[in-house]
Image (cartoon, rainbow, N blue to C red):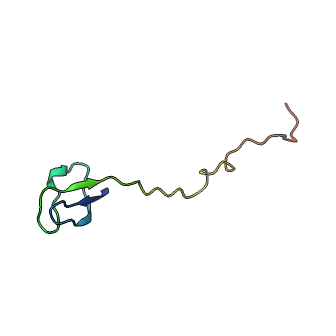
Amino acid sequence: MPLYQYTCPQCGLDFEQAVPFSGQPDEVRCPNGHRQVRRRYTSPALIFKGSGWYSTDHRKRTGSTEAPD
């Protein structure tokens, strides 16, 4: 489930809540019980791990010393 950040305009509370893809945005409530919350749009947290994410991982070699067939 994705984790979204919300702000409650009534009490000013910022909070995070995991909402399933099948969930409706109007089902989200503030921990204090308020219904009208606003979703905050933030940058996604992407972490590129492992090989293949750098330009040097799959670069074609130039000036190869192998003889052509």
Q: Please state which of residues 64 and 33 is positioned toward the viewer in this rendering.
A: 33
Q: Please state which of residues 64 and 4 is positioned toward the viewer in this rendering.
A: 4
Q: Is residue 14 above or below residue 23?
A: below
Q: Residue furthest bottom?
A: 32
Q: Residue at x 67, y 46 (%)?
A: 58
Q: Is residue 49 above or below residue 62?
A: below
Q: Is residue 68 left or right of residue 12?
A: right
Q: Residue at x 69, y 50 (%)?
A: 56
Q: Is residue 46 above or below residue 69?
A: below
Residue 25 x/y as whole percent? 19, 50
Q: Residue at x 24, y 56 (%)?
A: 19
Q: Residue at x 37, y 55 (%)?
A: 42
Q: Please state which of residues 3 and 51 is positioned toward the viewer in this rendering.
A: 3
In which quadrant of the rendered view does residue 36 lie?
A: bottom left
Quadrant where the C terminus sits is: top right
In which quadrant of the rendered view does residue 43 lie?
A: bottom left
In which quadrant of the rendered view does residue 49 lie?
A: bottom right
Residue 44 x/y as whole percent? 41, 54
Quadrant where the N terminus sits is: bottom left
Residue 46 x/y as whole percent? 46, 56
Q: How many marks?
A: 0
